[in-house]
Image (cartoon, rainbow, N blue to C red):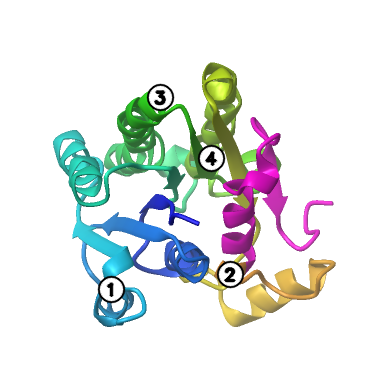
Amino acid sequence: MTPRVVIITGGSRGLGAGIVDSFLANGDIVATCSRSATDRTERWAADPATADRFLFAAVDIVDSAAAAAFVGEVVTRFGRVDILVNNAGIARDGMIAVALEEDIDTVLDLNLRATFVMTRLVTRRMLRQGSGSIVNISSVVGTAGYRGLSIYSATKAGLDGFTRSLARELGSRGITVNSVAPGYLRTEMSHGLDEAQLNQIARRTPAGRLGEPEDIGSVVVFLTSPAAGFITGQTIVVDGGLTA
């Protein structure tokens, strides 16, 4: 089977790196970007098992011109884009009454605007191909809501709405669009919680543990596979039963 070409934003660490690992393990070609390289990106680029199937670029996708150049580089090198995973995101904790405007702009610009721009760039290629899959990484906080995360929650809820509308726009053209909403994961995004708080969350979770990046990666790979060809416009919650 011909390897698929996958773009994953924010794939240098944490959840994004777990998603990169899942697609590389599936035999796909993966291009990812973030603001800077990490040990993970350098290892994928140097590993003989993945080097010819991996591309990393240091790109801030909030810069629309830089995002366009990155997509162009992927197409020039690999010829097409079959899958887009909009994973890049950022959170700013704090109550809305004391939120700084620059923090509001930072969260909105990366979590929403940059996602819209990347999706516009990639869907133009997919529409010409007549096929493709898009997965937006949202969050359980987009539906449940959490104190001190109102801005972040709003952006994640926005991604789920974007998913539903885009699925209607693109479904007749052979392109599926879904969201994956993770619960609490043991990644950098849980940096604001101490070990006691994380253990408390694990005890409240029916699965009895926090999520791992590969828990999400396997679902994303499934949603972009032929087996999920009739699934579109959905938000798949992967939280170990926390919001059940």
| Residue at the (20%, 37%) spot, across then down | 68
Which amino acid lies under the numbered mark 3 shown in the image of this protein? Answer: Leu
- Disc with the residue nearer the chain's start (3 vs 1): 1
Which amino acid lies under the numbered mark 1 shown in the image of this protein? Answer: Ala
Q: Is residue 156 left or right of residue 11?
A: right
Query: Magenta includes 213?
Result: no
**Residue 123 in picture, x, y percent from top left:** 38, 29
Name the secondary structure under disc 4: helix
| Residue at the (68%, 43%) spot, across then down | 228
Seen from the viewer's position, the closer of residues 234 and 29 is: 29
Q: Which disc is residue 224 wearing?
A: none
**Residue 173 in picture, x, y percent from top left:** 52, 21
Name the secondary structure under disc 3: helix
Q: Nearer the viewer, mark 1 or mark 4?
A: 1
**Residue 47 in picture, x, y percent from top left:** 30, 82
Measure the alpha-carbon separation of dots 3 and 2. Answer: 30 Å
The magenta segment: 215-244
Name the secondary structure under disc 1: helix
| Residue at the (50%, 71%) spot, across then down | 25
Measure the alpha-carbon separation of dots 2 and 1. Answer: 21 Å
Q: Which disc is residue 156 wearing?
A: 4
Q: Nearer the viewer, mark 4 or mark 2?
A: 2
Figure check: 38 above or below 8:
below
Q: Can you see residue 88? A: no
Q: Which residue is mark 1?
A: 51
Measure the alpha-carbon separation of dots 4 and 2. Answer: 20 Å
Q: Which disc is residue 127 wearing?
A: 3
Q: Is residue 53 left or right of residue 144?
A: left
Q: Which residue is mark 2?
A: 214
Measure the alpha-carbon separation of dots 1 and 4. Answer: 33 Å
